[in-house]
Image (spheres, helix red, strand yellow):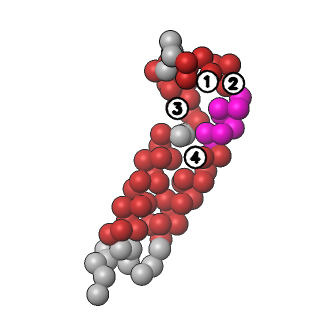
Amino acid sequence: MLNTDLNGATHASRGRAYAWGVLALLTCPCHLPLLALLLSGTAAGAALSNHFGVAILGLATLFILSLTSALRALRKRP
């Protein structure tokens, strides 16, 4: 018998869901100005400021994919 919670999700799928959720939180496009501020003065910050539009598009795509993966992992039934 698998260890499940009330929703029927296993502990492993719940851990994957939290990992995807953390990735979604970090790649949220609304956090891009904070990321640019934290990376200022570095090569990554310079690349980010030179390609801000591409960064927004890439982070938005990664955010949507990780958020849907987190939700899918939470709903997964054993």
Q: Is residue 67 above or below residue 43?
A: below
Q: Which residue is mark 1?
A: 48
Check disc 2 and report its element: helix, strand or loop: loop
Q: Is residue 78 above or below residue 36?
A: below
Q: Which residue is mark 2?
A: 51
Distance, label 3 to label 1, CA atoms, is 13 Å
Residue 9: give x, y in percent of width and height. Answer: 38, 74
Q: Amino acid at mark 1?
A: Leu
Q: Residues within 10 Å of mark 4 (few under 14, many from 20)?
A: many
Residue farthest to the bottom? Answer: 1
Check disc 1 and report its element: helix, strand or loop: helix
Range of the magenta residues?
Answer: 53-60
Q: Which residue is mark 4?
A: 63
- Whichever of labels 3 and 1 marks the residue nearer the N terminus, that label is 3
Check disc 4 and report its element: helix, strand or loop: helix
Q: Which residue is mark 3?
A: 31
Q: Do the numbered discs 1 and 2 sit on residues whose CB atoms are within 8 Å?
A: yes
Quarter of the image that includes the C terminus: bottom left
Distance, label 4 to label 2, CA atoms, is 18 Å
Q: Amino acid at mark 4?
A: Phe
Q: Quadrant of residue 45?
A: top right
Mark nearer the viewer, 4 or 1: 1
Left or right: residue 60 compared with residue 66: right
Distance, label 3 to label 4, CA atoms, is 11 Å
Mark nearer the viewer, 4 or 2: 2
Q: Residues within 10 Å of mark 2 (few under 14, many from 20)?
A: few
Image point 52% across, 66% down: which residue?
A: 72
Image point 51% across, 16% down: which residue?
A: 42
Mark nearer the viewer, 3 or 1: 1
Mark nearer the viewer, 2 or 3: 2
Residue 17: give x, y in percent of width and height. Answer: 43, 60
Q: Amino acid at mark 3?
A: His
